[in-house]
Amino acid sequence: MYIYYLIAIVIVAIDHWTKWLVVKNMELGERIVLIDPTFALLSHRNRGAAWGMLEGQMWLFTIVTIIVVIGILYYFHKEAKGKPLFQISLMVLLGGTLGNFIDRIFRGEVVDFADVLIPVINYDFPIFNIADAALTIGVVMLIIVLFLEEKAEKAAKKKGE
């Protein structure tokens, strides 16, 4: 069961390695186009939550993050036993949560660098990092898990009637 914690550890490690590379090798605001016009690296800092909301509310982020981490660990140990997809989704969420939390604690801001443009609709997606991507993937996985569990429960009830 504890092997799943490696998922969170790997996410945090990759997140901080990529952030370190950006901080070490790029000037703040510098942009390097990798796939024109769709994807670029952009050295950016965020002192808020997603998309810069609640900038400067460090105390709030700390409290919310501690509550989220406790919730993830509770569900991992109490509700997700024997449910690998559920366990994986929670560890992906934990990795993303801790990746940005570590930035906030040690830097006072989060390093963002992935700049994605969706040319078909001319939408410049908010700049993000590996931890943000992990949070999004973890939430999507969790929604799928909950949907599949609900579907299985309904099928079991129907079969039992």
Image (cartoon, rainbow, N blue to C red):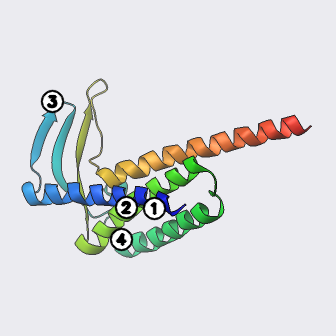
The tag on residue 57 is 4
Relative to 151, is 92 on the left or the right? left
Residue at 42% from the left image edge and 52% from the top image edge: 135
* Residue to which mark 2 is pinned: 9
- Image coordinates for residue 79, horizontal then vertical, percent: 65, 59
CA gap between label 3 and label 2 equals 32 Å
1 and 2 marks in contact (CB < 8 Å): yes
* Residue to which mark 1 is pinned: 5
Tell which tag, 2 or 4, sits nearer the viewer. Answer: 2
CA gap between label 2 and label 4 equals 26 Å
Callout 3, which amino acid?
Asp
**Dot 4 crowding, Cα within 10 Å, few <14, some 14–19, many 20+:** few
* Residue to which mark 3 is pinned: 36
Tell me: residue 1, above or below residue 107: above
Residue at 44% from the left image edge and 53% from the top image edge: 92
Whichever of labels 1 and 3 marks the residue nearer the N terminus, that label is 1
Tell which tag, 4 or 1, sits nearer the viewer. Answer: 1
Q: Quadrant of residue 50?
A: bottom left
Callout 1, which amino acid?
Tyr
Q: Quadrant of residue 54?
A: bottom left
